[in-house]
Amino acid sequence: MNPVLQAFVTSANHAFTHEDGTTLGKLFVFTPSTVSELGRRISASDNFDQYTSHITDPVHAQTTHVYLTYVRDSQFVSAEAGHGQLCRLAELLTVALTAATNGWLVQVVRAVALALCMQAQWAFASTGDAAVYTQTATRLLQLLIVALGDTGPEQTSKKRVAVAVAGLLLRVSLRTSAAPGAYAGKALEARALLGSSSVPRRDKVSFMYWLGRYYLVCYNIDAARIQLDRAFTMCPAWHYHNKRIILRYLFVANMICGRLPTRGLLEKYDMESVYYQLVACFKAGDLAGFQNVLVDHMDMFREQGNFLVLLERTKMLIYRTALRRVSLIDRGEERANVVQYRDVLTAFRVSAQNPDMDVFEMEGILASLISQKLVLAFLFHHQKLVNLSRKTPFPVISQIGKTKPR
């Protein structure tokens, strides 16, 4: 008999019997060092049934058996095989969570869900098969449905793990778009739990981060900015690395909303070199320079998933800046709000480094700016003039489309 196995199964059986989620969470650990050490100690055992047969509940016995098999084989089997074992473990936990009368299993569910996502990432990296993400999303969705369906008291509810699982489901859906939209739609139901005091802070921050990224991909920029800003604010200062990751996406959402970071903030999180170049080009109305910076660092921005968002959603804003700079040229009090086409065309040509731009293309850009309410103005085609609003020709971008309360 292996004393390590015997002690593990005895402790697991006691935890399952007495619904001790804390002890169970300390047993079912997925950190690489712990898995490696436990796997080394039980590597000589090839029959776990003689140990797990003492666990009275068959689901709990199978759960323990699958976990021990995963630990023992983790150093020898492929990442795809390990992912299959964790999928089976998540399936068994779904059954156990459904049968539980309260949320005592939430700590183990959170650990297994996170381990499943990480294993899916490794399996995809080694095989390139997006099916692992689909399988992962399916298991997470099953867990989420059970967690959200609990109507028990908040402090002991299964819903305490719903925010963590929903965040991971959004994370999987963003990896390769393997998860159908219905999966992400179910994850959005967890937003109602963000105000709950029973949900850990780390789960809230993680969920808001992935929710913000989800909104960013859906081009719901204002909602993305709100969620990412909350995640950045709520994330503790000592989690420097996490705050830096959140800031990468908050930077994008804020820029599209016309909010630019200070150089000091970028320096604080070691983002100054590349990101401040984008800020400088944006402020100067330099579209060609902005796009050149993006192309020069294409691999980085594509890996983050921000390349196309920045490329597509900032173009009109940078042309807007170029028009604004032209409008500031002193033309006398009587014509202070009037800009001639030739001045706008010159500014746009310089901004885009496109000497072949003609009046019709320029007029199309102006019409787009006006239709999106980025600029309040009228075009006089025959007179070749842009008549800007005297009051606020360039409204605050983040306030465009919002109605003021009466």
Image (tube, helix red, strand yellow):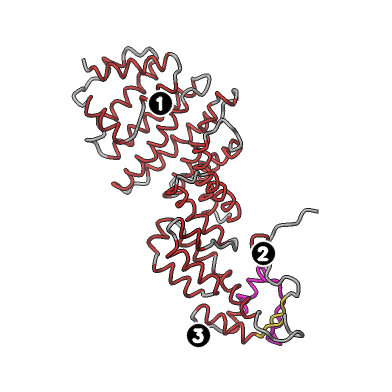
210, above or below 91, in the image: below
**What kind of element bears circle 1?**
helix
Residue designated by label 1: 25
Residue designated by label 3: 355
Mark 2 neighbour class, 10 Å CA radius: few under 14, some 14 to 19, many 20 or more: few
Residue at the (40%, 56%) spot, across then down: 303
Amino acid type of the residue that numbered disc 2 sits on in the rendered structure: Val
Count the numbered circles shown: 3
Q: Could you give the CA–CA distance between mark 2 and mark 1, rounded to whole angstroms?
A: 50 Å
Image location of residue 307, percent across then percent down? 45, 62
Q: Which residues are magenta?
A: 363-385
Mark sitting earlier along the chain (1/3): 1
Question: Depth-wise, is mark 1 or mark 3 nearer the camera?
Answer: 1
Mark 3 neighbour class, 10 Å CA radius: few under 14, some 14 to 19, many 20 or more: few
| Viewer-proximal residue among 92 and 256 | 256
Amino acid type of the residue that numbered disc 3 sits on in the rendered structure: Pro
Q: Is residue 133 left or right of residue 350?
A: left
Residue at the (50%, 63%) spot, across then down: 263
17, above or below 371, in the image: above
Mark sitting earlier along the chain (2/3): 3
Q: Could you give the CA–CA distance between mark 2 and mark 3, rounded to whole angstroms?
A: 30 Å
Residue 340 forms part of the magenta stretch:
no
User: Mark 3 and mark 2 in contact (Cβ < 8 Å)?
Assistant: no
